[in-house]
Amino acid sequence: MTGLFERHRPTLTAAIEAAAKRDFWTVYPEVPSGKIYGETAKDDGLAAYRARLDAEFDLADHPAEGRVGAEVSPYGPALGITYPAASADMLVMASRAAAPQWAAASPDVRAGICLEILARLNARSFEMANAVMHTTGQAFAMAFQAGGPHAQDRGLEAVAYAYAEMTRIPAQATWTKPQGKGAPIVMEKHWRIVPRGVSLVIGCNTFPTWNSYPGLFASLATGNTVIVKPHPAAILPLAITVEIARQVLVEEGFAADIVLLAADAPGAEITRELVQHPAVAIVDYTGSNAFGAWVRENAGNADVYTEEAGVNSIVIGATDDFAGMCGNIAFSLSLYSGQMCTAPQDIFVPRDGIETNEGHKSFDAVAAGIAAAVDSLLVDPARAAGICGAIANPATLARIATSRPLGRIVRDSAPVEGLDGARTATPLILAVDAADTDAYAEERFGPIAFVVAVDDAADGVDRAAALAERKGAITAALYATDEAQILAAADRFAVAGVNLSVNLTGGIYVNQSAAFSDFHVTGANPAGNASLTDAAFVANRFRVVMWRRPAAA
Amino acid sequence: MTGLFERHRPTLTAAIEAAAKRDFWTVYPEVPSGKIYGETAKDDGLAAYRARLDAEFDLADHPAEGRVGAEVSPYGPALGITYPAASADMLVMASRAAAPQWAAASPDVRAGICLEILARLNARSFEMANAVMHTTGQAFAMAFQAGGPHAQDRGLEAVAYAYAEMTRIPAQATWTKPQGKGAPIVMEKHWRIVPRGVSLVIGCNTFPTWNSYPGLFASLATGNTVIVKPHPAAILPLAITVEIARQVLVEEGFAADIVLLAADAPGAEITRELVQHPAVAIVDYTGSNAFGAWVRENAGNADVYTEEAGVNSIVIGATDDFAGMCGNIAFSLSLYSGQMCTAPQDIFVPRDGIETNEGHKSFDAVAAGIAAAVDSLLVDPARAAGICGAIANPATLARIATSRPLGRIVRDSAPVEGLDGARTATPLILAVDAADTDAYAEERFGPIAFVVAVDDAADGVDRAAALAERKGAITAALYATDEAQILAAADRFAVAGVNLSVNLTGGIYVNQSAAFSDFHVTGANPAGNASLTDAAFVANRFRVVMWRRPAAA
């Protein structure tokens, strides 16, 4: 039973150490290379994906009352896959039936199984890349990284935190209380980890694996059974995940139903029934603020962990690398067409312009510099397709159209050339004034950005931070050359609970969050009520129960 | 600013180590001895308490719109003390005004201040003992221990957990990502701890300090400002606590309002306004299930930690020390007249009796043995007074009267002799059958116990555990001689989330929970939604925010 734990122990130990040090560390290679994953891995993954299409996705022995599935690739074709579907009650009943066995497994056994699931997911990264690409619209390279190794990193991180927290409590101890000149009182004490109950993980459309794995693996490692509820438009990546988890569980002698898939149909979602079910003790949710508020209010006594939406900002005060800055921002705006929870929306620029290594740049020159950098980045259609990918949700395309009148168009959005049949859009960039809060101070999800004229950088920092406090924000960026101004901005964004990136001009982008180093979401503003990647995220997923007795004389 | 931290660092380090080992450890002596606390400490403490009576309790510069106070000692006299009183809004406004300074203090500075507050509380333990005695009804020795050193232990434990969790996150790190043959990407990253907001600690009547210190010190150490809301019948112990905290804060250059007292009048409590205030981010609550449910439902987005009520059970299957067992149970039933959250209420005994070192004992003989042990324990009036103390709430006395008809009286309750003017009662013990759930399966707070006839010990374990799952329980006890039966009971009570004590016959009682070793409350049944003493209790009281930039070349 502990064979898997022994096999993966070095990885777990290294992960725990990495999370404490917070230097770069990974065990799942992010490069989609045949040299790493095997020369046929890419073709095999594509073939495996294609074999899923227009067929029933079979999950052996999974509870089912029917089949659902209506996924359509943002690149065009319908996937034609159906999945076993069951009512919330049926799923919860199956989850509870599997619970005692999983609760009784040791933290070592559970950690071993979690790491084996992750290892197999890693080996299947090319298949997953296709599944993520055709449900989210991410370009292939991003779908591989974010849907595969980077998501696996986050899953491993959750297991590492969970294992570290569980093993802080000794399994047993002797308690010896001195009694003056008399014999001491000696007690033997035994502690065990007990799970909370059924854990519900609600996935999102754009990052079905990356955003679900922290909650999924944190709950699984701590002994809870897990119901994975995918977004109806992005079921396949989580169905593959559940399939692998169930295979490993069964191989190790556990009930497959420890991990269940709650597939449902658009317009007939069972999310509310699951959230309100009294047996659901933990809810992990990624999605809109509106439904997030409903989840937080209706989950009863369940603990709820959310990543919701926000408005991310960049503040430009000065730079000694104007071209690098514009190029870096252009990439952040273009990557996955602004559909990342970490993508910037508002760029605050002093209305009198800024000082740069290229001399003074007016507000308009800064806006034009960013627009030109986007044009340059996306001039080659193949490269543009590889950066922008496709638009997951038709409503996002519609939002671009309704946003155009909100400001002066600095750069217009257009389809990505050469992706026939795909739903695509390059960034729309609008110039507005700080007073135009109706335009820029609402989340406008997708490739929509505002260059906002402010008094000066300090005014920009204040407005960006206040906006984060009101609407939420996961990232912020600052360009400044004055150290005191940088430190003051760090103070202000810390109060607003936003992670800040300063003077990014090279190969790191504000959108990026690295496992084992960057905590994702702070939980300190409306963009989410928890970090997905810290001790607080795992510590409440289990309880500790003791029995004690006088020690034998 | 870090002088206090350096002074108390050895204590903090030892506390963190003790919490990891979970052997016996304490730094605040539990013996009310003049040799430890100073030869005049007892008299000084009494004099300090007496000087409080019939006077205004002055909290320098504390927000106030009037004065309240209507405490009456369970031993008879009114305390005649009034406290500054302010509206919920005024208190929250003052708390928020003090917040930025406290949030900006380092974890070291905050820990040093917390430990200095605890050290001064320890030095004032005799004064506190009188304050606790005359607000709760605890006998002096218990009021000293539970209200003084043991409460301080729990406060220190919270600081230790909080400090350990905060310092797991490095203040800064260098992140170096290899780039194949190219130069690596190097980022400098900085993290800081940010608090959640205003923390509200709602105290109870019976253990005003012991039950409040975990939340108070956990929130304070993690940078939150704290509003302490005492039970209107037990304000003085927390007023003294707040007074000392404010003195230390001011001496160290901080705003006194980082810790506030929310004194209110019976019937005009401001608890609901405080719980529902949007600025309140953390609520710690000790009290009834009914109001606990209201708090959990009405606290909005605040995190809520509760210790509520439950029905604690003892299961008797067999014993090789019948006299020791009866004596141990008698003490648990009598101590503070059953007003501890850890006191047993239901004693499950096989209706065909049990095997003991004194031969077979019938159900009636077991019940009679416990009753006789209570009689023997309380035969001396002075000793009885020292064990039972007085009854905090008149409703508890009334409950004894209404409970008498619920079963066959094995031992009747009576006043404690010699405590003229005090509200006292020795244990009422009733015999019932397992079918009489209307009698024993409800919490009947106070010196009311049921000996419940069951089929056998396994039936008793099942019923006790199921009752814990339904109504909550903080403790359980088992007497058994068969190891397999003991291990099976440990399994069953673990599922029910109850800490179990086995075969207690000597100087340790099921009611007792030792800091740094016993986690208090599991959070895994309706008796409370959290443990008061683990990492999960502190990890969500702060968030982590980062800023990062490319490292200078």
Image: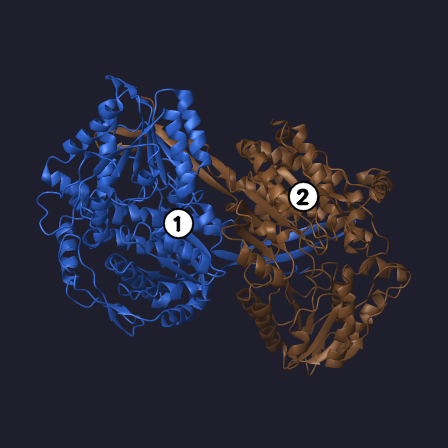
Chain colours: A brown, B blue
How packed is label 2: few (under 14 Cα within 10 Å), some, or many (20 or more)?
many
The image quadrant that residue A46 belongs to is top right
Residue picked out by circle 2: A86
Query: Could you tell me which chain the residue with mark 1 belongs to?
Result: B
Q: Is residue A370 visible?
A: no
Query: Could you tell me which chain the residue with mark 2 belongs to?
Result: A
The image quadrant that residue A181 belongs to is top left
Circle number at residue A290: none
Residue B550 image offset from top left, x and y in percent: 67, 60
Closer-to-camera residue (A256/A420): A256
Circle number at residue B158: 1
Closer-to-camera residue (B402/B212): B402
In the structure shown, which secondary structural element does the residue marked by tag 1 occupy? helix
Please tell me which residue is depicted at 91% across the width and 61% down the height of the picture.
A418
Task: Look at the picture and state if B252 lies above or below A243.
Answer: below
Q: Is residue A470 visible?
A: yes
The image quadrant that residue A460 belongs to is bottom right
Toward the bottom, the furthest residue is A352
Residue B210 image offset from top left, x and y in percent: 31, 49
Between the residue at mark 1 and the residue at mark 2, the CA separation in whole angstroms equals: 44 Å
Question: Which quarter shows the N terminus of chain B?
Answer: bottom left
Kind of residue at badge 1? Ala
